[in-house]
Image: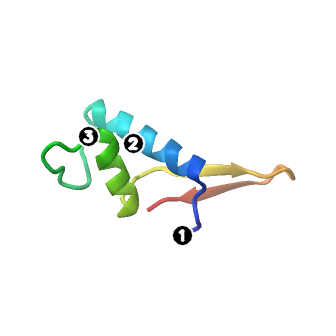
Amino acid sequence: MEVLTRFEKTRLISARALQLSLGAPPFLKAKKGMSMLDLANEELNAKLIPLAILRQFPSGEVKKVEVF
């Protein structure tokens, strides 16, 4: 897996937290008192988030970076 920038990590965590808050099933068991952001962060650390990042380079090339 490629290294994600802090901006990419933030985008992935926020998108996954939104999915979870709208009723998407979690891939990890949530601990008591855990927020959606915390759960999304744990899923990212475990490489379980089913999302991808599209990186666009100045040359026009687009690269898809899978998270899981």
| Residue 38 location (% of width, % of height) | 31, 47
The residue to which callout 3 is attached is 35
Q: What residue appears at the point 54 percent right and 69 percent down from the top-left corner?
A: 1
Q: Secondary structure under badge 1? A: loop
Q: Secondary structure under badge 3? A: loop
Sort mark 1 into few (<14), some (14-19) or many (20+) by Cα contacts within 10 Å: few
Instruction: State the scheme by which the image is colored.
Output: rainbow
Q: Earlier in the sequence, mark 2 or mark 3?
A: 2
Q: Cβ–Cβ below 8 Å for labels 1 and 2?
A: no
Three-letter residue code for mark 1: Met
The residue to which callout 1 is attached is 1
Sort mark 2 into few (<14), some (14-19) or many (20+) by Cα contacts within 10 Å: many
Sort mark 3 into few (<14), some (14-19) or many (20+) by Cα contacts within 10 Å: some
Q: Earlier in the sequence, mark 1 or mark 2?
A: 1
| Residue 6 location (% of width, % of height) | 57, 52
Residue occupying the far top of the picture: 22
Residue occupying the far left of the picture: 32
Separation of disc 2 and disc 3 at Cα?
12 Å
Compared with 16, 2 (above or below) is: below
Separation of disc 1 and disc 2 at Cα?
19 Å
Q: What residue appears at the point 17 percent right and 54 percent down from the top-left corner?
A: 29
The residue to which callout 2 is attached is 16
In this rendering, would 34 be left or right of 52? left
Q: Cβ–Cβ below 8 Å for labels 1 and 3?
A: no
Q: Earlier in the sequence, mark 1 or mark 3?
A: 1
Q: Cβ–Cβ below 8 Å for labels 2 and 3?
A: no
In this rendering, would 50 be left or right of 26? right
